Image: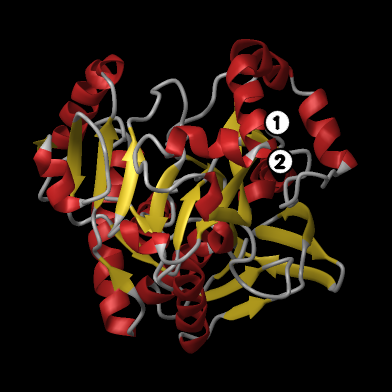
Amino acid sequence: MTGQTIGIVGGGIVGLAVGRELSRRYENTRVVVFEKEDRLGVHQTGHNSGVVHAGLYYKPGSLKAELCTRGRSMLREYCAERGLPYDECGKLVVAVDRSELDRFDALEATARRNGVPGLRRVEGSGITEIEPHAAGLAALHSPETAITDYAAVARAYGEDIEKAGGRVLLSTAVTGVRRRVGGIDLETAGGVHPVDRLVVCAGLQADRVSRLGDGVDGPRVVPFRGEYMSVAPPKRDLVRGMIYPVPDPRYPFLGVHFTRRVSGELEVGPNAVLALDREGYHRRDMAPADLRSMATWPGFWRMARTHWRTGAAEMWGSLSIKAYMRSASRYVPSIGAEEVRRAGAGVRAQAVERDGALVDDFRIGHEDGITTVRNAPSPAATSSLAIAEHVVDRMAVD
């Protein structure tokens, strides 16, 4: 790829990590990042909880498990080099009643197979030694689960690209992809940009932009809004690190949890509510194009028929702070609805297959000079540098 121009569509943390890796590995390769917003990391990168995952949840042997493990250590080193915040405040995953213990045991087995560093099972008083105000029967303690500022990390990746001679084009949406002999033309409002290869890391728009390049329809993105509550002082000091529930294995979401921010704030969330706008962060936001995309996708209706009860419960929690906190307060009884206020929200790009299956693992494809990242949910930010290595390795043999 030496001497080539490679276009990256998407200025989120994954696209920028890929651009950075290409710039590092191939000194004479010109990287051009196309970002439709006026700044980097606007959507998923800038609206997540900032957690650096240690690999507890992911199916052993999956890309998520492999790349999260490597990506975490690479990110820790990168943050140290660049003076970016990185706080190993640790995480407890807590089982609060006996009905959860089978899932809890399965989670522990998965975490141990994934080699989660320092993992320890604690019970009874062991829980309160780590988190004095937490409650539960048993917990998994992951001491190296950390927090960072992913928007700052993404900006640093962008700086690395530009220092290596690449370009980051803001306010430049790619509206068309045309193959030609020997390369690819990217259409934007400002004109046509010729590139030799293309990498699509478009996040919430990943299915649409990928389809421009390869013509493949599916899986489609179904957006889920994740809403947060902020814990008011002095109650925000009751949690030292992170406290999570035992997740439901039917879903790729981890459940409402308590998370510290590098700013010192304590947040509760996120939930997972069906969104009517891929880039809408409020309940009333609605985008006709996004509604059409869902309504015309058979997988959406099959998913809805299967999971409507869970969806209804999530919606009720979105409307009522008391309902939202009813579950969270089981883990920290001292923090209830009176101690929180509504904070921000993010939108997760959940890929859904035609048969209604929720895509769980990373989905990365390569074909004839075009690489598409169609599904990169959490822990994609944690894994960003390792995802970049994986993508560039595959591009080298494509």
Residue bearing mark 1: 217
Task: State the SS at label 2.
Answer: helix
Compare marks 2 and 1 and give the one earlier in the sequence: 2
Residue 100, x across and y down, in percent: 29, 20
Residue 357's image quarter? top right
User: Is residue 159 something that shows in the picture?
Assistant: yes
Residue at figure coordinates x 30%, y 14% from the top left: 99
Q: Residues within 10 Å of mark 2 (few under 14, many from 20)?
A: some
Query: Camera-side residue: 345 or 266?
Result: 266
Q: Return the x and y of residue 120 as percentages of the image width and height.
A: 10, 42
Mark drawn on residue 211: 2
Compared with 161, 370 (above or below) is above
Label 2 and label 1: CA atoms lie apart by 6 Å
Would residue 28 be found to the left or right of residue 70 on screen? Answer: right
Mark 1: give few (<14), some (14-19) or many (20+) Cα within 10 Å.
some
How many numbered badges does the structure rendering display?
2
Q: Is residue 369 visible?
A: no
Q: Residue 240's spot in the image, x, y percent? A: 28, 60
